[in-house]
Amino acid sequence: MDNNKIDTPLASFSLTHVHYNPEDPLSYLCAFLSLVPQAIVVVYVALIWASREVEVLFMFAGQILCEALNFGLKRVIRQERPQRTLPQNLSLLRFLSIWKFISAPAKRQPSLEIYGKGYGMPSSHSQFVAFFAFSVALFLLVRHKPTSSSTLPNDSPSTFAERVILSLLAFSGAAAVASSRIYLNYHTPKQVMVGIAAGIAFSVVWYLFGTHLRRSGWIDWLLEVRMAKLLRMRDLLIGEDLAEAGWQRWKVKRGQSVVKKFE
């Protein structure tokens, strides 16, 4: 090897690269929470491929546009991330008291100073999960009107209370992800709050836009396009609980096969 040749330094893939304190279990958990948006994208793609539901595809399109909005906002506001140092003496109890955490930050390791890549306002993680959680809640509590199938007498779609619980779980998960960005000091509390507000606002706008497309017939028109037919796109999710309906169909088919065996 030529000793005069300078090797190109290796770089890390920032999309999945998270700094955390290995001596702090909560910091370790927050590092995993920071990967939730990537996991949600995988869930989106899997659901679109498995269900071919236009509603899931529409929500994923909104999620991508929400990320594009965040990209633009960061370059308009141009606010730097906080100087990041790993938590040293931050207890779980103290962190859960968020206002104490904001007003009296924990001691940090002065020797370790790291800066995140890109601008910090608003937090993209917070905006991502806020859009996702609020979109899920709007769908489950407003748009989704599950009805029992006439061909499946035992069909029992999810109740409103069950959908409220699912919505609360989505909000709790979003809050955990957003809080992890503060704990790891990737963002200031203000950057996280603005990200949450932007995500919620865009989810409402996207929901209203979707309602307009449905009422004006654009969704029905899209499903008649040749490409949509080739991809077997459908629109059953509004009035059907896919898990329950699929399970009931399986029970009927299984019951028929059992009867045939004993005939």
Image: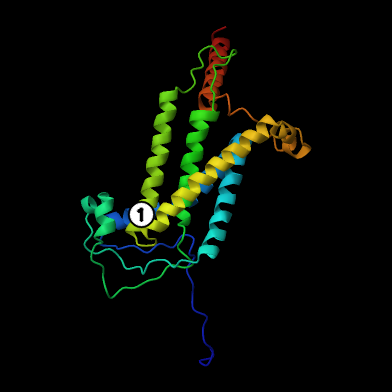
Q: Judge whether 263 appears above or below 99 on screen.
A: above
Q: List x then y, in percent, for residue 89.
A: 21, 62
Residue under the image location 26 percent in, 67 percent down: 108
Farthest-out residue, top: 263
Q: Quick check: can you spot residue 52? A: no
Residue under the image location 32 percent in, 68 percent down: 85
Residue under the image location 53 percent in, 56 percent down: 70
Q: Judge whether 33 appears above or below 255 on screen.
A: below
**Which residue is disc 1 drawn over?**
180
Q: Is residue 78 left or right of residue 260?
A: left
Q: List x then y, in percent, for residue 8.
A: 52, 80
Q: Give the structural element (helix, strand or loop) at label 1.
A: helix
Q: Quadrant of the C terminus?
A: top right
Q: Which of the 4 quarters of the picture holds residue 144?
A: top right
Q: List x then y, in percent, for residue 231.
A: 70, 38
Q: Judge whether 262 appears above or below 201 on screen.
A: above
Q: List x then y, in percent, for residue 42.
A: 53, 47
Q: Which of the 4 quarters of the picture holds residue 120?
A: bottom left
Q: Is residue 120 left or right of residue 214?
A: left
Within 10 Å of the Cα at label 1, are there few (<14), some (14-19), or many (20+) other Cα atoms? many
- Looking at the image, which is closer to me, 57 or 77? 77
